[in-house]
């Protein structure tokens, strides 16, 4: 297992940024997203370091998705409790994930503004997707998992992944179409 | 939806997501790298769960309140107590993940592990 350390580190380095963004889209909270990714890293290393490397990605995302799901359950109960006692948690509000994004391709202020707006529209549309649709789309279209791996990561049948994915595409098309000038 | 339209949406999404990752603040990148190093260095121990601690304390109070309120005629839905139990159990995540793992092993057969 000690020999797995370099490979594990390479794997985690390869997924950590995307995993963070997925967690942030899934929760809307930067700090919580960081903690969920950290916990997922620890869980993967602690339990599955001796698994074949090709299993790490679906396992890691399965762990992360479990954490996000439990985060929502805890959040729901916490909000309910706070509602009862008449106070609201003012911290932890989501920061705009694309706020102040520079355009790495340059091209002047107009181009930069257009690119930023396009990025913002897409991220907002992704953020509004129902969780299962969001999961299936992010894991398949962005993380590159195939349908079977996505099904493992989401804990559902491959047919369900295809359904969620198709609905996500429809929702994105609708959302982006509505906002286009 | 046509295949071309699907590919266009997928490509737009990938570009937006890639760009959002490329421009992540250095502080976020540093914390992720630190978490990765700690995970590798600290194999065998659980991750610190700072955010769970206040939630756990809050949940303990909430569970006590729920049990008290959930008397005949009180307004709390009975099923919600299960959620409070979840809040109280820091091991629940581990349990869920192990269950997943065993289910996966069963599906994968002898080559799974």
Image (spheres, grey):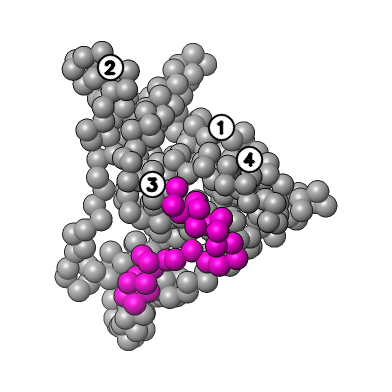
Circle 3 chain: B
Residue, x 24% and y 20% (percent of image)?
A: A112
Can you identify the residue that label 4 sits on? A149
Task: State how far apart marks 1 and 3 are (Cα).
Answer: 25 Å
The answer to whether marks 3 and 2 sit on the same chain is no
Closer to the chain start, of discs 1 and 2, is 2
* Chain of the residue under the numbered disc 1 shown in the image: A
Q: Chain of mark 2?
A: A
- Residue range highlighted in magenta: B33-59
**Dots 1 and 3 on the same chain:** no
Residue B71 spot, x, y in % from top left: 34, 85
Q: Is residue B16 left or right of residue A116?
A: right
Q: Chain of mark 4?
A: A
Q: Are marks 1 and 3 in contact (CB under 8 Å)?
A: no
| Relative side of A152 to A19, left or right | right
Residue highlighted by disc 1 = A144
Marks 4 & 3, CB-CB < 8 Å contact: no
Please state which of the two labelled residues, at mark 1 or mark 2, is closer to the viewer. 2
* The C terminus of chain A - image quarter: top left
> Which numbered tag is attached to residue B30?
3
- Earlier-in-chain disc, 4 versus 2: 2
List the residue tagged with mark 2. A106
Q: Is residue B30 magenta?
A: no
- Residue B44 location in percent, x, y? 60, 65
Q: In the rendering, which numbered label is found on residue A68?
A: none
Q: Are marks 1 and 2 in contact (CB under 8 Å)?
A: no
- For the residue pair A131 and A36, the one nearer the viewer reads as A36
Disc 1 vs disc 4: Cβ atoms closer than 8 Å? no
């Amino acid at each position: 297992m000690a020999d797995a350390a370099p490979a594990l580190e390479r794997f985690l380095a390869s997924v950590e940024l995307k995993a963070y963004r997925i967690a942030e889209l899934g929760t809307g909270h930067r700090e919580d997203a960081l903690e969920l990714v950290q916990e997922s890293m620890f869980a993967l290393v602690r339990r599955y370091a001796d698994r074949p490397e090709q299993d790490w990605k679906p396992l890691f995302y399965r762990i992360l998705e479990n954490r996000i799901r439990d985060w929502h359950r805890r959040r729901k109960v916490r909000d309910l409790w706070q509602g009862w006692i008449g106070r609201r948690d003012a911290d932890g509000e989501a920061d705009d994930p694309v706020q102040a994004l520079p355009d790495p391709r340059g091209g002047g202020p107009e181009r930069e503004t257009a690119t930023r707006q396009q990025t913002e529209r897409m991220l907002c549309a992704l953020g509004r997707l129902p969780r299962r649709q969001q999961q299936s789309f992010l894991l398949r279209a962005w993380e590159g998992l195939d349908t079977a791996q996505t099904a493992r990561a989401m804990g559902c049948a491959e047919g369900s992944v295809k359904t969620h994915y198709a609905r996500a595409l429809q929702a994105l098309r609708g959302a982006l179409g509505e906002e286009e000038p | 939806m046509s295949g071309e339209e699907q590919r266009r949406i997928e490509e737009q999404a990938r570009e937006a997501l890639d760009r959002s990752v490329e421009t992540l603040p250095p502080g976020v990148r540093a914390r992720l790298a630190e978490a990765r190093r700690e995970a590798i260095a600290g194999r065998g121990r659980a991750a610190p769960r700072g955010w769970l601690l206040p939630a756990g304390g809050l949940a303990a109070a909430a569970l006590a309140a729920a049990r008290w309120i959930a008397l005949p005629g009180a307004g709390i839905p009975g099923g919600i107590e299960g959620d409070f139990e979840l809040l109280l159990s820091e091991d629940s995540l581990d349990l869920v993940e192990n269950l997943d793992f065993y289910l996966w092993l069963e599906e994968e057969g002898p080559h799974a592990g």
